[in-house]
Amino acid sequence: MSRTPDRSGATSDAAQRLQGLPEVLHVVAFPRWKWPVIRQCFPGRDLRFVDAAHVSPEARCLVLWGKAAVPQGAATGVQVLRVEDGFLRSVGLGAELVRPLSWVIDTRGIYYDAGHESDLEWLLGHGAFPPALLHRARVLRERIVAAGLTKYNVGAQVWQRPHHATRVILVPGQVETDASIAFGTTATGLRRNMDLLRQVRQDNPNAYVLYKPHPDVAARLRMTGVDEERATDWCDAVVTDVPMHALLDVVDEVHVMTSLAGFEALLRGKAVTCHGQPFYAGWGLTHDRVPHPRRGRTLELDALVAAALILYPLYLDRRGNGLISAERALDQLADWKTRKGTAAPWWIEIYRFFLRRFIGVR
């Protein structure tokens, strides 16, 4: 895989959005394994780690994970930063506590909450995408596709498209308790993997329908969805340990609630139907079952890539040396994937056993 120059020097593009924050940031209820990562996101600032019950009303800026509630002790109108995994995260699962290569920091909301504008939605709706940025996004997208990179980069098996299948639809499963479903499907009411699968089968009776459970569920680190053991009642095949990029290369369409697999399919030129309202829906690039009232701008694919993969995330050097550009992060992710390989290590099931025992299956 060819390397490209680090186009933004030693820092990530998203860091520019976060200039002007207070010197002291109160990080609320983060587990200790995330402390070094959040410190890397805010070089030079004073981070104070507190639990939700001990947030001082004097705190000017709180850092919360996802949609965590603002603590009762916080001052009215306190500034809130919400943190989540980025879209090119790691080689390995977040549920396995694998250190992330990217996080997003949002000052307005969070990208999967369709009910409120996030920084990402604002960028997509109002941002400028000059030719140089679009070119940079196109090169980045082509490198991602060529290297077979996705969010988690897991899976070792191969799936062969049946010769008789003239139209193959992939339905990626999600963790049904995830906030992305709770906050990205409120306008549609479709919140179960099997409800989505049944709908796809009903709408496409002659298609070859493929279902892929979420890798966290396949690893038994997250709860199985309702009736998910009956998936073959509504699809032609279920695949688990097959890399997402390999499936996307051979299917014709992808149907999602809010899964990031829909975005990854767009990168590869596939048709995507959204039964929820993920961040990439509503910009003229997807077939949307429920149009989003705030999203009416028509974007080209590389504008979506520029916002979601260049302007929005913070990329974290794997050696802990501060923030890096999207291009440099792609180099590190590709190297990580090459060194680790696709097969799971021999000890992974033992490790997962202890995670299930001490952290639980959520």
Image (cartoon, grey):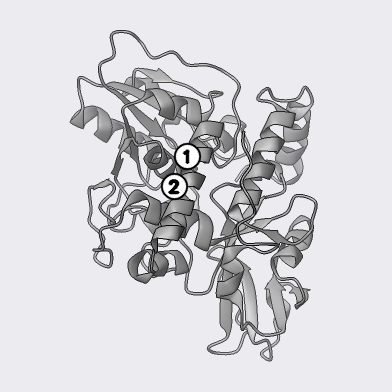
Give, as a three-letter code, the residue at label 1.
Glu
Asked if 184 appears above or below 48 in the picture, the reply is above
**x, y percent for residue 350:** 78, 29
**x, y percent for residue 92:** 66, 37
Closest to the observer, 103 or 300: 300
The mark found on residue 231 in the picture is: none
Q: CA distance from mark 2 to mark 1?
A: 6 Å
Residue 263 found in image quarter:
top left
Crowding at label 2, few (<14), some or many (≥20) Cα neighbours within 10 Å? some
Q: Is residue 13 left or right of residue 341?
A: left
Label 2–label 1 contact, CB within 8 A:
yes
Q: Which residue is mark 1?
A: 142
Q: Which residue is mark 2?
A: 138
Q: In the image, what residue occupies the spot 70% across and 79% down?
A: 25
Closest to the observer, 269 or 340: 269
Asked if 301 appears above or below 241 in the picture, the reply is below
Asked if residue 112 shows in the view, the reply is no
**x, y percent for residue 235:** 33, 22
Asked if 149 appears above or below 107 in the picture, the reply is above
**x, y percent for residue 59:** 68, 86
